Image (spheres, rainbow, N blue to C red):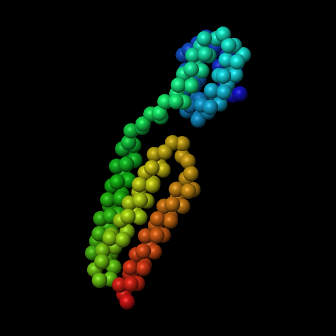
Amino acid sequence: MKYLQDIRAAHADPERLENLYRAALRENAGDEWKSDLLACLAESPDNILYTAWRYRLQASETEPPESRGVNWKLAIPLGLVAGLVFAVLSSSRLDLPRHTPLLLFAWAPLGACFIVAFLTLQATPREYPKRVWAVIAGLIAIGVYVILIVALANRA
């Protein structure tokens, strides 16, 4: 009931209600705001502004979420770092025995790590960060395991 008093005070002011709603969304409290608005509507069923808001909120539940654009400020640096890592791994100094390029076995898990990192860092709100880092650690561990197996097999 955090927004109840503010919604009651703005019972005839559409601009103020809109500002309250946007503030609630910024605080990730849209559901709480909606329940407070519906409580105000139950108290004042003849208030046309509350009724209009009820229909607006119902319509927004059935509409598909807006697609967000690509976060280029994050994608470009991550892409540059990934390219640099791949360039270093393609060096002949890092070849495995029998001139097998290290990049041959490392590109897939490393590429997946960069993709997972990008998707995690652009997500709002930040959900499941511990799981994401566990996935990245697992991908790196799988890559290292495969490289070690190939290195040991090539020595034999």
Q: Residue at x 41, y 64 (%)?
A: 109
> How far across and how far down the image is residue 21, in percent?
57, 25
From the viewer's perspective, tell me whether residue 52 is left or right of residue 41: left
Position of residue 155 relative to residue 3, above or below, is below
Evaluate whether residue 48 shows in this view: yes
> How far across and how far down the image is residue 56, in percent?
54, 22
Front residue of this view, candidates 54 and 7:
54
Q: Residue at x 46, y 70 (%)?
A: 142
- Residue 79 position by quadrant: bottom left
> How far across and how far down the image is residue 154, in percent?
35, 84
Farthest residue in the bottom direction? 156
On-image quarter of the C terminus = bottom left
Farthest residue in the front direction? 62
From the viewer's perspective, tell me whether residue 81 is left or right of residue 4: left
Q: Residue at x 44, y 73 (%)?
A: 144
On-image quarter of the N terminus = top right
